[in-house]
Each structure stands twice: as structure tokens, then as C-alpha cells.
């Protein structure tokens, strides 16, 4: 216990906290003054299918939540997180060290728009991304630039993500993204444009009788057109409890 506390104190900086991910003892370092992960990252890590021995790239990894979760949930060989903000990437690297995942998880500082020059073309089996949902000109930006970057397409666009994913995915490689339903037509059109064919879609509803607030999409590089609509995922019951079931009454995840 004392060794663990000493390790935490060496990795945490002032104002940061260590959150228990409730997954095999894994933890994540976060700064409450910056953008912290939400349920969307957890949903994406459940939706993404990573097979034994596969290599995964998470675009715009932030604090590294998705690579860390996928390392804990799957038998993938190696997970890379790409993050443009150097201090956020450094914090993610400390989470990797805390979890002793250095042999499976790597955090790289770099720009999504240049991802295909940072990594080898057609190298990854799987790409995941939890991108900014809002267009750069849509709505009010948070005065905190870091949060604006996470929520609005300030530093990268949907086109940037899909273009670089097309270049980095192997043939029949898989692409996983969580986004907002109001942009679904644009998402599906552009995925096909960049030769990442939509294969699976799942809507996420806060309550059974409410419209979806998130959508999970799986695509495949170079596949033929054919898409499956999964049963909707319902997050909460009316009594306020966590439901996390699909629309047919089965537990999600």
C-alpha cells in the first residue's frame, strides 16, 4: 500500500486526481480543470471490437482513456494514442506508466491532420476516435481553449479524421467512432467517400422514450455496402438508476 501511494504521488501533479476505472485495478490521471472523459469514451470502448494480436490507433486520445480501457478489455497486441496537446499527452503517458502498460500502450504527440506521415500507411487493424462533435462555427465555444478543442472542430475536422484513417487502416481494417446523431447523414456520406464503408450503427438513448443523444458507428476499409442497425442502447431508467440495456431489454456492453 505504501509503495502504491508513493508511486501515485510521483506521477500526480498539483491539481490532478487519479480515477479508478473499475477495470482490473486500472486508473487514469485527470485534471478537473481540463477536459475529463465521459460516458461516451466508455461506450466507444465497449462498441469497438479488437481481436487478439491486433494493432489499434486512437485519434485524439486526450488523457488516453480509450487505449487504457481497450488494453484492459481486449487481447489486442498494441494500442497507440495520438494527441496534439503536448501537456495532455504527457499526462496520458503518466497514466500508462501507472498501469504498467508501457509494453502495450504508447502515447504519441502529433496532429491528426498529419497522422499518415507520423505512422506507416496501412499499418493499423483498428482505428477508434471520439472526435469533437460540434462544427467550429456551431454554438458558443468554451472560453477554456482546451475544452473548445475537445468539443468543437477547431484543430481537426471529420474530413481530416476520415482521410487519415483511410490511409492508415489496412484493407478490411475497422473504424469505430462515437458522434452525435444530428451529423449522421454527413458521417455516413463522408465515410463512403473515404472508402470506409459503414457496417454497424447503434443509437444511444438517455431514456427509453427519449430520442438518441449519441450514435456509435463501425466502418470497414474497402468493404462492400451493407449496414446493420444494432438494437438501441438505453442508458438510464426512470428512477434515475444506470440501466445500460439495449432496446430489447438485454444488458449492453
Image (cartoon, grey):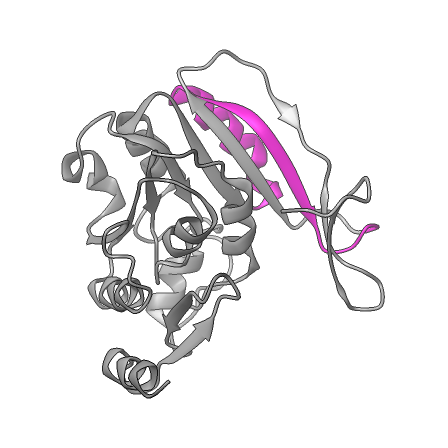
> x, y (%) of residue 83?
27, 54
In the rendered structure, the answer to whether residue 162 lies left or right of residue 86 reads right
In the rendered structure, the answer to whether residue 237 lies left or right of residue 151 reads right
| Residue at x-position 34% and y-position 68% | 145
The image shows residue 71, relative to residue 38, as above or below, that is above
- The quarter of the picture where the N terminus appears is bottom left
The image shows residue 53, relative to residue 78, as above or below, that is above
Quarter of the image where one finds residue 150: bottom left
> x, y (%) of residue 98?
30, 69
In the rendered structure, the answer to whether residue 39 lies left or right of residue 87 reads right
The image shows residue 10, relative to residue 73, as above or below, that is below
Q: Nearer the viewer, residue 113 or 233?
A: 233
**Residue farthest toward the left in the current orientation of the protein:** 117
> x, y (%) of residue 120?
17, 31
| Residue at x-position 51% and y-position 58% | 139
**Residue farthest toward the top in the current orientation of the protein:** 224
| Residue at x-position 22% and y-position 39% | 115
**Does 200 appear in magenta?**
yes
| Residue at x-position 38% and y-position 56% | 68
Q: How many labels sit on residues?
A: 0
Q: Which residues are magenta?
A: 180-209
**Does 142 appear in magenta?**
no
Quarter of the image where one finds residue 65: bottom left
Q: Nearer the viewer, residue 249 or 58?
A: 249
> x, y (%) of residue 182?
61, 42
Amino acid at each position: 500500500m505504501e509503495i502504491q501511494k508513493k508511486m501515485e504521488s510521483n506521477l500526480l501533479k498539483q491539481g490532478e486526481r487519479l480515477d479508478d476505472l473499475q477495470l482490473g485495478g486500472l486508473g487514469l490521471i485527470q485534471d478537473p480543470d481540463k477536459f475529463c472523459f465521459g460516458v461516451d469514451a466508455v461506450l466507444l470502448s465497449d462498441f469497438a471490437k479488437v481481436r487478439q494480436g491486433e494493432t489499434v490507433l486512437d485519434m485524439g486520445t486526450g488523457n488516453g482513456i480509450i487505449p487504457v480501457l481497450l488494453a484492459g478489455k481486449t487481447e489486442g497486441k498494441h494500442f497507440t494514442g495520438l494527441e496534439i496537446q503536448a501537456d495532455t499527452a504527457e499526462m496520458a503517458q503518466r497514466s500508462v506508466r501507472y498501469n504498467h502498460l508501457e509494453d502495450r500502450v504508447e502515447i504519441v504527440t502529433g496532429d491528426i491532420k498529419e497522422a499518415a506521415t507520423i505512422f506507416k500507411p496501412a499499418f493499423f487493424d483498428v482505428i477508434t476516435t471520439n472526435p469533437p462533435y460540434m462544427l467550429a462555427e456551431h454554438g458558443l465555444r468554451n472560453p477554456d481553449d482546451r475544452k473548445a478543442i475537445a468539443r468543437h472542430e477547431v484543430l481537426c475536422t471529420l474530413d481530416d479524421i476520415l482521410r487519415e484513417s483511410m490511409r492508415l487502416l489496412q484493407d478490411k481494417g475497422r473504424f469505430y467512432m462515437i458522434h452525435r446523431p444530428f451529423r449522421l447523414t454527413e458521417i455516413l456520406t463522408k465515410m463512403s467517400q473515404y472508402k470506409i464503408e459503414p457496417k454497424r450503427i447503434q443509437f444511444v438513448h438517455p431514456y427509453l422514450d427519449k430520442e438518441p443523444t449519441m450514435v456509435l458507428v463501425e466502418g470497414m476499409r474497402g468493404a462492400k455496402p451493407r449496414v446493420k442497425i444494432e438494437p438501441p442502447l438505453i442508458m438510464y431508467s426512470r428512477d434515475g438508476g444506470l440501466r445500460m440495456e439495449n432496446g430489447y431489454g438485454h444488458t449492453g456492453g
